Amino acid sequence: ALFAGIWLRNADLMAFTIRASKAATRLTEFTPGANKKDTNLILGGAADPLAKSTVNHSEVQILLKYPIPQEFLEQMKTPQFDLWSLRRRFDNPTALASSIVLKLMLSTGLPEKFGCQEETLAAFIVACRRKYRSVPYHSFFHAVDVLQTMYTFLYAGRVCDRLSDLEQFVMLIVALTHDLDHMGLNNSYYMKTESPLGILNAAGGNTSVLEVHHCNLAIDILSHQDCNVFEGLGKEDLQAAYRLLIEAILQTDMAKHAETVNHLKGFEPASFDLASEEHRRFAAITLMKAADISNVTKPFAISKQWGKAVVEEFSQQGDKEKSQGITDVLPMFDREKNADLAKSQIGFMEFVTLPFYALIVEKLFPDMAFALNQLKINKDTWVNQPPESPLSKSRDLIQ
């Protein structure tokens, strides 16, 4: 019952997400084993079967054949994977990053096990890629980084021992979809500016503006038959996959971080029961949160680049708020006040990531100690760094 509280508190939010989605899925009407064209998976109340997406067939074929240099084939399954090097050195880093995502997912054997064709997976990746914007941090490259990190946590960190095969497959899908169409602005911005997204969510009593938006778009992409990576799932597995996808994305809202930490603190490691869906689901949600904020666990030079990117994105939001006459711009979003990169990174590590990762290793995933160890090294390195401005307009941050 320890983890049931999270589910209950999120019940209204999950219901709101599904109501708000253009492609809210009536999963109970799914007919297992039906032909794709005849599948009675009704979306948004419409009577039409799964529709074709607008993904160009040629884009899919290019991705299926796109070569990966040997150095990245060797590195992509390790915690040392350097996405920033890839972005700097290659003419089409987006295509190469997409190919790495495809190869990583196929290497697990999970798409094949759950009836997802290779071409469907490629189309899904292309569709997701199209939905990410050119912002300093929350771009397609962040989604790629989270997916690659989740891969290393699952297999190098042995988190796979705590999840079913289906849950592992879903979590890789969650990694790629969890920030779809992120505009480089946080939830608070949409609420304080009374934007259309903010008004819509406020009307439903929800403050997880972005997370609901990401869920909507993920469901919409999956509603197209050529992108439906869940195409091979039967009724029960399909329902379970959507429940986990929605809840894992919703729980990435940092406003819920303390809730996850408190549940970890109260959990006894010896009590973990692999047969318990509640325990496995909490493990999956914790894994997603860890992957989402994992930049600080990468080798220092890589971690530093992500730190610069996130601070630049925060500063751009602060600039936007000031231009709209907002006077209560928080210091971390104020370009003039957030001028010490080391200080901002040390603060995030001390108050958020170090306590969180220490709990993860102690309570749930002991084989993820390598991430905690690198995090400690990075913190010590920052302590000994001279003051440095985090702000940059370099093309690396806005590819």
Image (cartoon, rainbow, N blue to C red):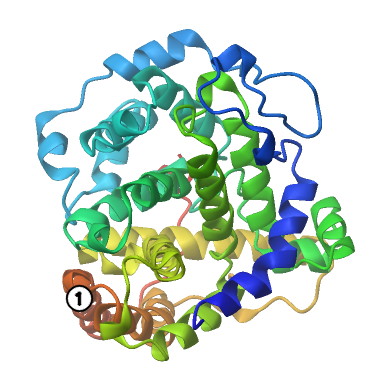
Label 1 environment density (alpha carbons within 10 Å; few <14, some 14–19, many ≥20): some
The location of residue 373, given as percent across then percent down, is: 17, 77
Q: How many marks?
A: 1
The location of residue 94, given as percent across then percent down, is: 39, 31
Tell me the residue at 53%/64% (across/down). 252
Question: Left or right: where does residue 274 sit relative to residue 320?
Answer: left
Residue 28 appearing in the image: yes
Tell me the residue at 62%/48% (across/down). 214
The one of 336 and 374 positioned closer to us in this rendering:
374
Tell me the quadrant of the picture where the C terminus can be found: top left
Tell me the residue at 59%/32% (across/down). 221
Task: Name the residue at the bottom extreme.
Answer: 266
Task: Name the residue at the top extreme.
Answer: 58
Tell me the residue at 81%/32% (across/down). 45
The one of 88 and 176 positioned closer to us in this rendering:
176
The location of residue 327, given as percent across then percent down, is: 80, 76
The one of 351 and 230 positioned closer to us in this rendering:
230
The one of 164 and 326 positioned closer to us in this rendering:
164
The quadrant in which residue 202 appears is bottom right
Give amino acid for label 1: Pro
Residue 178 appearing in the image: no
The quadrant in which residue 115 appears is top left
Circle 1 sits in a helix, a strand or a loop, which is it? helix
- Which residue is the site of mark 1? 366
The location of residue 14, given as percent across then percent down, is: 69, 59
Q: Looking at the image, is 337 positioned above or below residue 235?
A: below
